[in-house]
Image (spheres, rainbow, N blue to C red):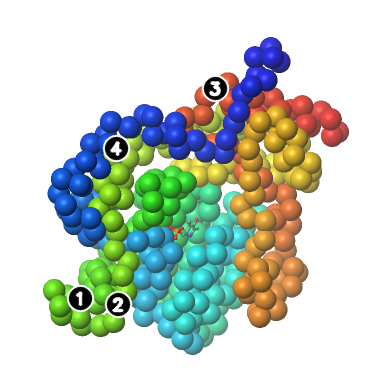
Amino acid sequence: MEDVHLNVKVPLLDLKAQYQRIRPEIDRALAKVFENGMFTNGPFVRELEATFAKYLNASYCRACANGTDALELALEAMGIQRGDEVLVPALTWISTASAVSRVGAKPVFVDIDPEYYTIDPEDCKNKITPKTKAIIPVHLYGNPAPMKELMQIARKHHLWVIEDAAQAHGATYQGAKVGTIGDIGTFSFYPTKVLGTYGEGGAIVTSHARVAKSIRIMLNQGQIEKNIHVMEGRNSRMGEMQAAMLQVKLPYLDTWIKESNRVARYYDENIDKRFYQLPKRQAETTHVYHQYVIRTRKREALMSFLESKGIQTAVHYPIPLPFQPAYKHYGHFPEDFPVATQLKNEILSLPVFPEMSEKQVEWVVKQLATFASQHP
Ligand SMILES: *Cc1c(COP(=O)(O)O)cnc(C)c1O
């Protein structure tokens, strides 16, 4: 019935609803931090590193201040520096590329795959030069990048693989959790991510003991022990409160992923595929739906229509990185990135989150159908 739905509001994500589910545990965890009287780089951070490594089946985990630092620390620990080139996808959050520039190297943009929106292995091959040192695949929107193809290219050309898993905690590729397939994996715990803290946080996972060891030192001012600085590092420590809150959330992650997948399945089965192009997944992967991204030529009109029906949407991302003002000096043309150039005008992220009610999901699907019927 139309009027039943009239007041349904559908945000992209509902962190307040999530808090209501875990409130007593979060409150207890915070009290414990205050009782301990240690606020950074303490027992909760150490415990989080152990439990997150265990969850992912990673050898080593290092918690840090945010996902951007995680990328920078990873690149630095792999020895990436001035004169080096690093392949990054054209469509991603800016940190993937800015971290490369921050360590002095050059981000080389690669077009994305037209089906999966992750870095295109074929275009990677075109962009490799004698200066290329690493590839950073991004598991964009929670959808694993084609790691098998990318690892083959990397091994052949002796490149490091740094997985940017900031949007894909818990996603799997051929049975392995993303972040553990390449040489090093990086995560963000920004509040809106699949696993987010209340504040900022990040993590690095690796199976290379040497790399894990140097990252531990780098992120804490180059100290190997109190007052002994073996290098100039930085302050990228994680706060105890952030770690304590992540410890509360981590055991729920798989349930939340299942719930988001339930929403995605409903979209998959009920949105009109003749009018909208729906997201695809590769075989043998699990997608964690950080975003559920559809494509339509009528994107702007659809966005305002949905907004008028109380449905929040967003575009991730309207300007591919090669065309950002920050990268103007590279002089890229739209023709250099045909897929990213077309997609930027068509992609739209629909609401998807674990707590989304049946009523909310149905409302979104219904309004998408109404819009389609008005735009034959
Ligand atoms: C969020 C994000 C980052 C950066 O993480 P922060 O914690 O915000 O610094 C890096 N890469 C991708 C793909 C992201 O989505």
The residue labelled by disc 4 is 26
- Whether residue 327 is visible here, answered yes or no, is yes
The residue labelled by disc 1 is 223
Q: Earlier in the sequence, mark 4 or mark 2?
A: 4
**Kind of residue sitting beneath label 2:** Gly
The residue labelled by disc 2 is 233
Q: Which image quarter holds the C terminus?
A: top right
Q: Earlier in the sequence, mark 4 or mark 1?
A: 4
Depth order, front residue of 353/114? 353
Q: Residue at x 71, y 15 (%)?
A: 2
Q: Secondary structure at mark 2?
A: loop
The residue labelled by disc 3 is 358
**Kind of residue sitting beneath label 4:** Ile
Measured as percent of width and height from the top left, residue 25 is found at: 26, 34
Q: Which image quarter holds the N terminus?
A: top right
Q: Quadrant of residue 78?
A: bottom left
Q: CA distance from mark 4 to mark 1?
A: 32 Å
